[in-house]
Amino acid sequence: MLANQRIGIHRKLMKTAAAADLYPVAIGTDAIVYPSPGPGPLDVLPHTGEGKPVPGTFRLGVSPGMVKHQGTRTVLWAEERFEEHGGVFNVANLIKDDPTAGEGE
């Protein structure tokens, strides 16, 4: 079951890269971090001309196969964590575990 989930995520990563030329900056156990031009998760996800998600890419929601927004942080926040942890950490896991991650800076 975990292998199927991992394969599905890899496929969605590749489709997102092909559709939007967008690549993750960090991948955690169940979190993926993308650079974003805006503060919300919809700023990252590629959409068709009609505003619908590109087929095969990530979709926000609570149904199986969909992803949820774990948090939005700034590059300065990541730099502070880098200095705090001495460069030995995965920013994907810190965003998820940070109690202030949902506040969106």
Image: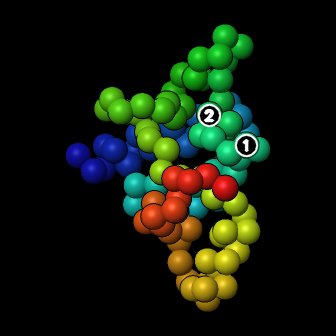
Q: Please name the residue shown 43% across and 39% down the image.
A: 67
Residue 32 seen by the camera: no
Between residues 51 and 102, which one lies in front from this camera angle? 102
Label drawn at residue 38: 1
Above-or-below relation of 7 to 32? above
Q: Residue at x 40, y 55 (%)?
A: 30
For label 1, count other residues whose C-alpha is less than 10 Å away and answer few (under 14), some (14-19) or many (20+): few
> Which disc number belongs to residue 80?
none
**Residue 99: where, in percent of width, then height?**
45, 64
Q: Which kind of residue does numbered mark 1 sit on?
A: Gly
Q: CA distance from mark 1 to mark 2?
A: 9 Å
Q: Secondary structure at mark 2?
A: helix
**Residue under circle 2?**
42
Amino acid type of the residue tagged 2 in the rendering: Leu
Left or right of 52? Residue 74 is right
- SS for callout 1: loop
Q: Quadrant of the C terminus?
A: bottom right
Q: Would you place residue 62 above or below residue 93 in this image?
A: above
**Quick one: which residue is furthest to the left in this view?**
1
Q: Quadrant of residue 76?
A: bottom right
Give above or below for 19 relative to 84: above
Q: Residue furthest bottom?
A: 86
**How far across and how far down the image is residue 85, in percent?**
57, 85
Asked if the residues shown at circle 1 and circle 2 are in contact, with their CB atoms under 8 angstroms apart, the answer is yes
Depth check: 46 or 84 in front? 84
Confirm whether residue 58 shows in the render: yes
Instruction: Measuring from the top left, give residue 52's x and y in whole percent.
Output: 59, 17
